[in-house]
Amino acid sequence: MKTSVVIVTKNRKDFLLRAIDSVVNQSVKAYEIIVVDDASDYDIKSVINNLNVESLKLIINPKSFGGAIARNIGAKATNGDILMFLDDDDAWQVEKIQTQLECFKNDEKLALVYSGRKIVKDSNLSLVIRKSASKKGGDISKLIFEKNYVGITSAVAMKKNIFNSVGGFDENLPCRQDYDLWIRISAHGNVAWDKKYSVIYTLFANPMNQISGRADKHEFAADYIINKYSSYLDNLPFILKRKSIAEKYFSVLKSYRRTDYKKSLEYAFKSFVSFPSIKTLILLLPQTILKALGI
């Protein structure tokens, strides 16, 4: 199986070099690396040419299209059987490609394989502060509505023919395009956790430096996804449907917590009404109490 890796970037030269380096140094090499520059304001062409990586191809967008369109542009330019994406501020451990290809070889029913994350801060890229992986697998076509059990774009390997058949990333979404794609792909085959934590995920102190860090984008995405899959949600068991809607609002709550406390309360209430939970109830407490608790 040939692996194609798509890296979308914008104005993150140092992080981009780190991301590319992590792909080039894989224990099993990628067939090709496609870098899609979404209208950076520096001379990225000279930077890429200086790397002298034969398998690397650069696509420069004439203007900034956003993550979903840029990733789809990159995917259309690939020639491999297995498609992987890497955000420019993330990096891979050396075994990522090898481990995920082995998963596909061992189970022909797999549509998608994901890895866990080692989370670091932008202030110290070598210090892992925690790990994250859902460890869910098999047929999650209904369960995926409840929560993004697959994770981030950088963690996934998928069959390109299935990616194409479901239409790629939804270009109407300003964020959570990955979650939306997993919903559609999981309807076409099983998923698996590769039992590794092969992605180094960078957490920025300034949320505006995070890809899709703006909370209003998450607000739009929550309503969009709920409306897009309303017929699917209506066919789910009642409890799963309510939990699914609550999760969408909880994601908005989390994105607003760092920038707009009043808005976060609004979505905490919406989430709690949709499906009451202890974690949401706690976040409805006054801000002074939450600070005292270190939350």
Image (cartoon, rainbow, N blue to C red):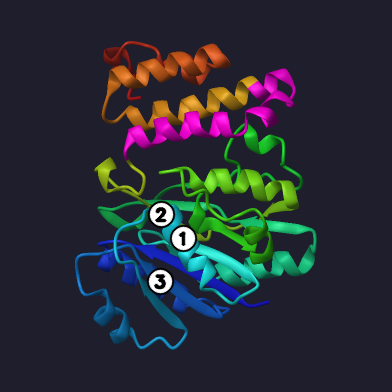
Q: Quadrant of the N terminus?
A: bottom right
Q: Amino acid at mark 2?
A: Gly
- Image coordinates of residue 202 in percent, x first then y, are 36, 53
Query: Which numbered tag is attached to residue 87?
Result: none
The residue at which mark 3 appears reads as: 35
- Image coordinates of residue 225 in percent, x first then y, are 54, 34
Q: Nearer the viewer, residue 14 or 48?
A: 48
Q: CA distance from mark 1 to mark 2?
A: 6 Å
Q: Amino acid at mark 1?
A: Arg
Q: Are dots 1 and 2 in contact, CB under 8 Å?
A: yes
**161 with respect to 270 (left or right):** right
Q: CA distance from mark 1 to mark 3?
A: 9 Å
Q: Residue extending furthest left?
A: 42
Mark with earlier residue (1, 3): 3
Q: How many marks?
A: 3
The residue at which mark 1 appears reads as: 71
Instruction: Tell me, yes or no, whether the highlighted magenta stretch contains residue 222.
Output: yes
Residue 168 visible in image:
yes
Q: Residues within 10 Å of mark 3 (few under 14, many from 20)?
A: many
- Bounds of the magenta segment: 214-241
The residue at which mark 2 appears reads as: 67
Q: Amino acid at mark 3?
A: Val
**27 with respect to 104 (left or right):** left
Residue 195 visible in image:
no
- Image coordinates of residue 23 in percent, x first then y, are 46, 73
Q: CA distance from mark 3 to mark 2?
A: 12 Å
Instruction: Name the residue: 53% across, 68% down.
Output: 76
